[in-house]
Amino acid sequence: MRVITRHTALLVGAAALGLAVVAFAQGSAPAASQPHPHGLFGGMLNALGKQPFILLFLIVAGGYALGKVQVKGVGLGSTAATLLLGLVVSVWAFQAFHIAYAIPEFTSTVFFNLFIFAIGMKVGPQFIGGIQREGRHLLLLALLVPLLSSLLVYLSKFVFHLQPGLLAGILSGANTATPGFGAAQSALASGAVKLTGGATLEQARANLTTSYALLYSVSMVLFTVMAKVLPKLFGRDAVADAKAMEKVLAGEQQSALPGTAESFLRGSMPVDVRVFRVENPEVDGRSLKQLSHLAPRAGIERVLHAGRIYVPEDGLVLHRGDEVAVAGPVGLLMMGPQRIGPEVDDSRLRDVRFETLEIVAHKSDLVGRSLGDIASQEGHGLYLNAMFRGGDELPIARDAVIRRGDVLRVTGSRRRLDMLQKRVGRVVRPSLVTDIITLALGVSLGAFLGALSVPVGGVKFSLGSAVGLLIVSIGLSILRTHNPALGGPFPEAARELLEDLGLNVFIAILGINAGAGVASAVAGGTLAPILIIGVVAALVPPIVAWAVGQYVMKMNTAVLMGAVAGARCNSAGMRAAQEATHSIIPAIGYPVTFAVSNLLLTLICYLFALMG
C-alpha cells in the first residue's frame, strides 16, 4: 500500500505542478500592461527568444537534469521533465513579459521523425513475433482507449457548457492526436459546422487550438509519469516481464540476429591467445604449412626468433627455443604444452586483437561447402560464433552445408579475418559510421508513405508520417536480419542518439511553443472545464485498458505498456515504458495500437468539430 501511495503522490504532484504553472499565469499581471521586457529576468527571457537555438537546448539540458531527480526512487524522467520545463518557461515569458516563443514546426517534425525511425530500426526482429502472439489483443486495446475517451468527452457537454470547437480540441489534445486536431481544423474550414450561442468561426478555431495546445502539454506530462507508475500500481514487475518476453521471442535462439544492436557484442571471448616455447621435436625444423594439420582450428599469429618478432607465413620454419603466439578456441589451446612445448608469458606476443564480423555467403569459395571443410582450410585461429539462414539461427555441425545468403558470425584476429574476406566474399564489420544514405532514404520513404491520403466523406485519411516511418524502419530492420550488409552500418550508439535526442527535442519545442495557448485558455475563462474533462479523458481510458489487458487478456506487462501508450498516441509514454523496463519490448505493442487509434480519433474529432 505504501508503494501505491508513493507513486500516486508522484502522479498527483506532477499534475499539481502543471496546474501551478497555470495558476501562476492566471495570477500574473496582464500581458498588455507590460508590453516590453524589463528587469533581469525579462531581459534574459527576451534574449532567449531571439536565440531559439540556445533556448531549445537549454530546455533540453535542464529537462535531462530535472528528469534525474527522484523522490524515493521515482522521478519524472527526461521526457516529462523536458516538457514541463519548456511549458513553465514559455508561460512565464508570455504572461509576465509578453514574450511569445515560436520555434518553427518544421524543426519539431524533423526530430520527431528521426525518433520514430530509430524506434523501428530497433524493434523490427521482435515485432513479427509480438504481433503473432498479441495481435488480436492489440487491436482491441486500440479501439477501447479512443472510443472510451471520446465517450467521456461527449458526455461532458451535458455537464459543462462547452463553446464550439472545444469538444474536438479536448479530445485531440487529451490523446495527443495531432491528426485528429488537423481533421477538426478541416471540419471548421469546410463551413458545415453548426455554431451555437452566437459564436463565430474564428472563436471556434481559437477554442480548438487553445484546448488542444493546453491539453497536449498537460496530458503528455501526466501520461508519461503514469506510464512508469501503472505496473507497480497493479502489482507487476515490468523489468522481469520484459526479460521474460525477450526470452520467449528468442525461443531456442542463443545468439543475437544479424544486423541487430547486439550482433557484435561478444561477451566472453570464445578464442584466446597463448604463448608457447618450441621444444617438441615434432615441431622443430618444420614449416607452418606442415604443422597446420596438427591443430587445424588453431593458428600461429606471431613468432619470436632470435629476438625478432615475425608475422608468420606458410614457409616460415620453427626452431627449438622459438616462441609462438597461438590463437584459437580455449579448449584447443589447453593442448599446447603437449604439441609445442611449455607455456611462457610474453606480453609482446600475446598482443593480438580480436574482432567479430559477419560473412554473407555469395561466392563459390563458400557456397556449397560444409563447415568442416571450411574449418580445415580457412579456419586457423578462427571461431564460428553462429550461423543464420533467413533470419533464423542454425545449429553448427561439421556436415552443415552453406547456402547462398547464409550469414556466418566469426571471431578471430584482424589478419586472419582479412585473409578470410579475400576468399569468401562480403563481410560486415562493427562500425561507428552510420550509413546516411539509408537513413535519409528511409525517412523520406516513410514520410511519403504517411502522406498518402484517401478522402472519405470529406475527411482525408492517411497513415501519418509516424506510422509510415514505423512501417519502413521496421521492414528495413527485419530485412537486415536476413542480410546485415543491406543498408550499410547502423550502429546502436547512433540509433540510441537519434531515439533519445529526437524525442526530447520534439518535446522541448512542444512545451516552448505552448505558452501562448495556455495563457489564452486562462484569459478566456475556460481553464477549469478544459482541464477537468481533458485529464479524465486522458487518464481514465488507459487505466481501464490496462486492467483489461492485465486481467482479461493476460498480456505481458512490457508489451501492454507499449500498447496502452500507442492507443493513447503517446510516443513519450512509450519511451518512458522503455526506460522503466530497460527493454525495447514496449515498442512491440506500440505501432499497431498507435496506427488504429490515430485513424479512429481523426474521424471522431472531425465529427466533434462538425457538432460545434
Image: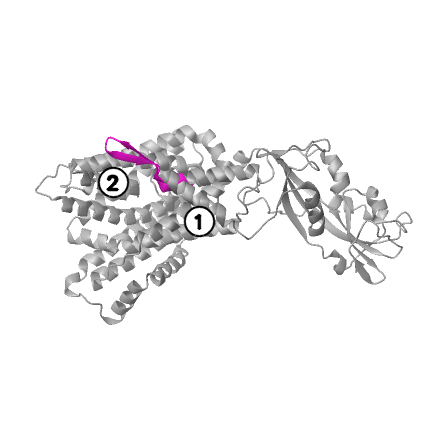
Residue 260 to residue 105: above or below: above
Left or right position of 136 against 168: right
Q: Position of residue 505 (x, y in %)?
A: 38, 54
The residue lying at 18 percent from left, 40 percent from top is: 188
Going from N to C along the chain, the mark reached first, 2 or 1, is: 2
The stretch of residues the image draws in magenta is 451-469
User: Which residue does the numbered mark 1 point to in the structure image?
Assistant: 499
Q: Is residue 601 magenta?
A: no
**How many numbered discs sit on the rendered protein?**
2
Q: Which amino acid, by three-letter code, is at mark 2?
A: Leu
Q: Which amino acid, by three-letter code, is at mark 1?
A: Glu
Which quadrant would the N terminus be assigned to in this image? top left
Left or right position of 464 against 276: left
Left or right position of 124 against 570: right
SS type, badge 2: helix
Crowding at dot 2, Cα within 10 Å, few <14 / some 14-19 / many 20+, comes out as many
Which quadrant would the C terminus be assigned to in this image? top left
Q: Which mark is residue 171?
A: 2
